[in-house]
Amino acid sequence: MSSRERETSTHFLITHEAKRRADEEFRKLEAEATPHWPGPGLHMPWKVFIDHPLPAQWPVLRGTALLWYAVGTAFAPWLSDGEYVTQPALAISLKVDSMSWETIVLERVVRSSGGQGVRPLRANEVELQQRAGEVLEILASLSRGADVALDESLLRSFYAMRFAHIAFYEQVEHRHRDFFRWVMGDPAPLA
């Protein structure tokens, strides 16, 4: 198995487990409201969306947890270029060095945060998105305490793109202030 196949496989397996946990826990939360379609009693249920993990601390040290945030999304046919989203309701935490998972409930009641626009990715964004496995492998390796070559340009470009496209990141920025500052160009040292 090539290193690229291993990264893709690891990314898939870890992300799949984070999504499975988010789906399971999200069903237990109380939904304050679901988006209503035009017409009496028509509504769309929330479905769970998780994006790429953020390190619980920056710089990443051995034992640093990776956090996937879970939000609800709902398709609305009258929004031609968007969807409804909730506030982050859950964080799924993984300590990679021990492979221990934890679910952190951020909101017991799911509330809409409004709409989020969507657009097709540009060619350079598609290329970055295809490197998601590499990004997760870098963060996971750092969390395991491995001595890895840090591709700063890849991490910064990848997360700057995600922060620009995913509205809920502004709601969790305070939890990851050092990482956000580093991604956006703060020259703070990595170690």
Image (tube, helix red, strand yellow):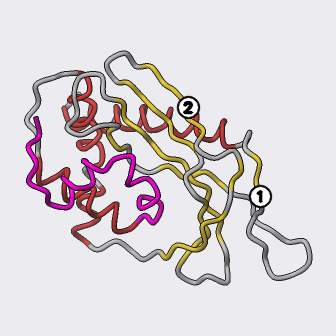
Image quadrant assignment for residue 108: top right
For the residue marked with disc 2, what is the amino acid?
Thr
The magenta segment is 166-191
Left or right: 43, with 14 as reference point: right
Whole-percent x, y for residue 30 in the image: 77, 48
Q: Residue at x 20, y 59 (%)?
A: 157
Whole-percent x, y for residue 63 in the image: 30, 22
Q: Mark 1 and mark 2 in contact (Cβ < 8 Å)?
A: no
Query: For the residue labelled by badge 2, is the local secondary structure a helix, a strand or a loop?
Result: strand
Q: Earlier in the sequence, mark 2 or mark 1?
A: 1
Q: Which residue is tagged 2? A: 103
Q: Residue at x 66, y 43 (%)?
A: 26
Query: For the residue labelled by badge 1, is the local secondary structure a helix, a strand or a loop?
Result: loop
Residue 187 is inside the magenta segment: yes
Q: Which residue is tagged 1? A: 32
Left or right: 171, with 43 as reference point: left
C-alpha span from label 2 to label 1: 21 Å
In the foreground, 176 or 38: 176
Vertical position of residue 80 compared to residue 19: above or below: below
Q: Residue at x 77, y 58 (%)?
A: 32
Residue 150 is inside the magenta segment: no
For the residue marked with disc 1, what is the amino acid?
Glu
